[in-house]
Image (cartoon, helix red, strand yellow):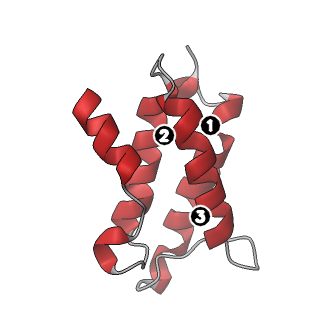
Amino acid sequence: AKKATEYLMSKTLGDDYGGRMSEWDYCTAFYATSALLHDEKDSWRKWYPKIRDFLVKKQNPDGSWTVEYCRSCKAYATALSLVILQTPKRLLPMFQY
């Protein structure tokens, strides 16, 4: 788990697609956020500001997020982004402990 966390922290979403966001980047961000929230070390304190700032920067003017090569994935990207951004509030049962 430690090696996986270190690897995750060293990556930037979109790296695998030349800077373009894929549906897998949003999925990775969602699961990483879910896992790191429950990490009792400082991984969460490093991860959340990084992913928050990244998502805010990627947000479209209309408030949505886009998988850059898939127009039909807009709802998926937006839903995952909103869940990730709400994580610190721990409103969803999966984020509570």
Task: Please tell me in which quadrant of the rendered image residue 54 appears.
Answer: bottom right
28 or 9: which is nearer to us?
9
| Residue 63 shown left or right of residue 22 in the figure | right
Give the residue type that dot 2 points to. Answer: Thr
Question: Whole-percent x and y of residue 66?
Answer: 54, 76
93 or 50: which is nearer to us?
50
- State the CA–CA distance, disc 2 to disc 3: 15 Å
Q: Is residue 67 above or below residue 37?
A: below
Q: Quadrant of the C terminus?
A: top right
Instruction: Read off the residue under disc 3.
Output: 78
Q: Secondary structure at mark 3?
A: helix
| Residue at the image position 61 percent from the left and 71 percent from the top | 58
Q: Earlier in the sequence, mark 3 or mark 1?
A: 3
Give the residue type that dot 1 points to. Answer: Thr
Confirm whether residue 83 shows in the render: no
Neighbours of disc 2 within 10 Å: few (<14), some (14-19), many (20+)? many
Contact flag, marks 2 and 1 (Cβ < 8 Å): yes
| Residue at the image position 42 percent from the left and 79 percent from the top | 20
Q: Earlier in the sequence, mark 2 or mark 3?
A: 2
**Which numbered disc covers residue 33?**
2
Between disc 2 and disc 3, the foreground one is 2
Instruction: Read off the residue under disc 1.
Output: 87
Q: Is residue 26 above or below residue 38?
A: below
Give the residue type that dot 3 points to. Answer: Thr
Q: Quadrant of the N terminus?
A: top left
| Residue at the image position 71 percent from the left and 31 percent from the top | 89
